[in-house]
């Protein structure tokens, strides 16, 4: 596992300097952020980096594979000793992949918790044709998650993070199913970490979004990332619900947050395989995570098409959808049930 320093809690943004020093960082530091995030918090972390080394700054305006590779080349040619990236998932993925390619330490400072990608060994970047690609890399070697800072981000991003973590519910069922069918192998450590991440939020004592709950959510997202690191893939936290989400990304005109898509997919697939989704639905409702397909801009036709084509999104990910009846009448019935129940 590559994560050496992990700090989660209120006010942790003030510990950038001590984090870098603990990891023996000195010399040139590449600071990567999007302009908006830098305008909010750059003045807080910039002096801390300057106390450790010389800053080279880079503003991110896209998440293309080519851009990440250019950054990696810059790091190598300029003899940069560390990459510090602050922002949302797209910005973090740029820094994460550049650090992986250049083999440099990486300090990740998320400003939102909308999905588990902030700590995963996977970077989702765009190809030249505009389509996204999930690329294997490494978990951040250092991470600071300031729950006070994250609490100030739009609540919808936090709700998306809740949705992404709850999707472990379906992903683990799919993994069990694939193993039983001889289509995959089990990694006990990875499974345990993904299950622990799920239980952490399902069994939380909090019933609303508050700083204390954000600490629980942060730890849950970190454990999901560790599960992927153990498994060497996203298998522990990605099943049929993620295949459905990827299909929505391709075929739905309205683009929703990933965490909301997979939460909807979790409820829908549970219904499709005849399992009771009540526990998941009640949890989403408790935190006001709205995954009503109509309000998400997902039409009945789009829902049906995406479910029927979801298995095409990843050829090596075997799930319940590969053996479930996906006839149009059944799917339209489930869509209408979702409209009533969500």
Image: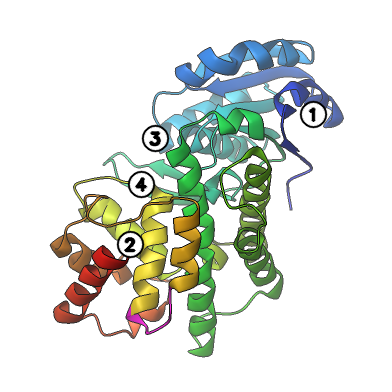
Q: Are marks 3 and 4 in contact (CB under 8 Å)?
A: no
Marked residue nearer the N-terminal end (2 or 3): 3
Rendered location of residue 109, percent (x, y): 63, 31
Q: Is 212 situated left or right of 323 in this image?
A: right
Rendered location of residue 155, percent (x, y): 47, 37
Q: Are marks 2 and 3 in contact (CB under 8 Å)?
A: no
Marked residue nearer the N-terminal end (1 or 2): 1
Asked which secondary structure carries label 4, the reply is: strand
Q: Is 15 situated left or right of 117 in this image?
A: right
Rendered location of residue 331, percent (x, y): 21, 75
Disc 3 or disc 1, which is closer to the eye?
Answer: 1
Marked residue nearer the N-terminal end (3 or 1): 1
Query: Where 171 falls versus 119 (above or below)?
Result: below
Disc 2 or disc 3, which is closer to the eye?
Answer: 2
Query: Is residue 310 part of the magenta span, yes or no?
Result: no
Q: In which quadrant of the rendered view does residue 66 lie?
A: top left
Asked which secondary structure carries label 3, the reply is: loop
Disc 1 or disc 2, which is closer to the eye?
Answer: 2
Instruction: Give the extent of the magenta segment.
Output: 272-277
Q: Residues within 10 Å of mark 1 (few under 14, many from 20)?
A: many
Residue that label 4 marks:
132
Q: Residue at x 58, y 52 (%)?
A: 207
Residue that label 2 marks:
342
Q: Residues within 10 Å of mark 2 (few under 14, many from 20)?
A: some
Residue 64's label in the rendered image is 3
Q: Are marks 3 and 1 in contact (CB under 8 Å)?
A: no
Q: Residues within 10 Å of mark 4 (few under 14, many from 20)?
A: some
CA–CA distance between discs 4 and 2? 30 Å
């Amino acid at each position: 596992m590559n994560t050496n320093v992990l700090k989660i809690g209120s006010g942790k943004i003030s510990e950038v300097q001590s984090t870098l020093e603990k990891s023996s960082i000195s010399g040139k530091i590449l600071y990567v952020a999007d302009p908006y995030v830098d305008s909010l918090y750059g003045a807080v972390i910039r002096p801390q980096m300057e106390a450790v080394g010389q800053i080279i700054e880079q503003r991110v305006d896209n998440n293309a594979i080519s851009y990440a590779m250019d950054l990696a080349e810059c790091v190598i040619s300029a003899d940069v000793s560390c990459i510090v990236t602050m922002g949302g998932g797209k910005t973090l993925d740029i820094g994460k992949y550049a650090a992986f390619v250049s083999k440099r330490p990486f300090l990740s400072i998320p400003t939102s918790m909308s999905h588990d990608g902030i700590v995963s060994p996977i970077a989702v970047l765009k190809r030249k044709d505009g389509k996204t690609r999930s690329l294997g890399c490494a978990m951040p070697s250092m991470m600071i998650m300031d729950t006070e800072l994250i609490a100030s981000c739009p609540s919808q991003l936090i709700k998306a993070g809740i949705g992404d973590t709850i999707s472990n519910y379906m992903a683990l069922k799919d993994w069990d199913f694939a193993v039983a069918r001889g289509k995959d192998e089990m990694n006990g450590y990875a499974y345990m970490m993904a299950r622990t991440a799920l239980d952490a939020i399902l069994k939380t004592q909090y019933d609303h979004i508050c700083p204390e709950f954000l600490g629980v959510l942060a730890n849950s997202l970190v454990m999901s990332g560790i599960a992927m690191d153990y498994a060497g893939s996203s298998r522990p936290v990605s099943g049929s619900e993620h295949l459905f989400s990827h299909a929505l990304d391709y075929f739905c005109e309205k683009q929703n947050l990933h965490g909301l898509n997979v939460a909807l997919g979790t409820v829908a697939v549970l219904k499709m395989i005849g399992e009771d989704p009540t526990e998941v639905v009640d949890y989403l409702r408790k935190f006001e995570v709205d995954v009503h397909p109509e309000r998400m801009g997902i039409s009945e036709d789009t829902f049906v098409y995406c479910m029927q084509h979801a298995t095409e999104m990843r050829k090596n990910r075997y799930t319940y959808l590969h053996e479930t009846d996906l006839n149009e009448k059944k799917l339209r019935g489930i869509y209408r049930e979702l409209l009533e129940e969500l």
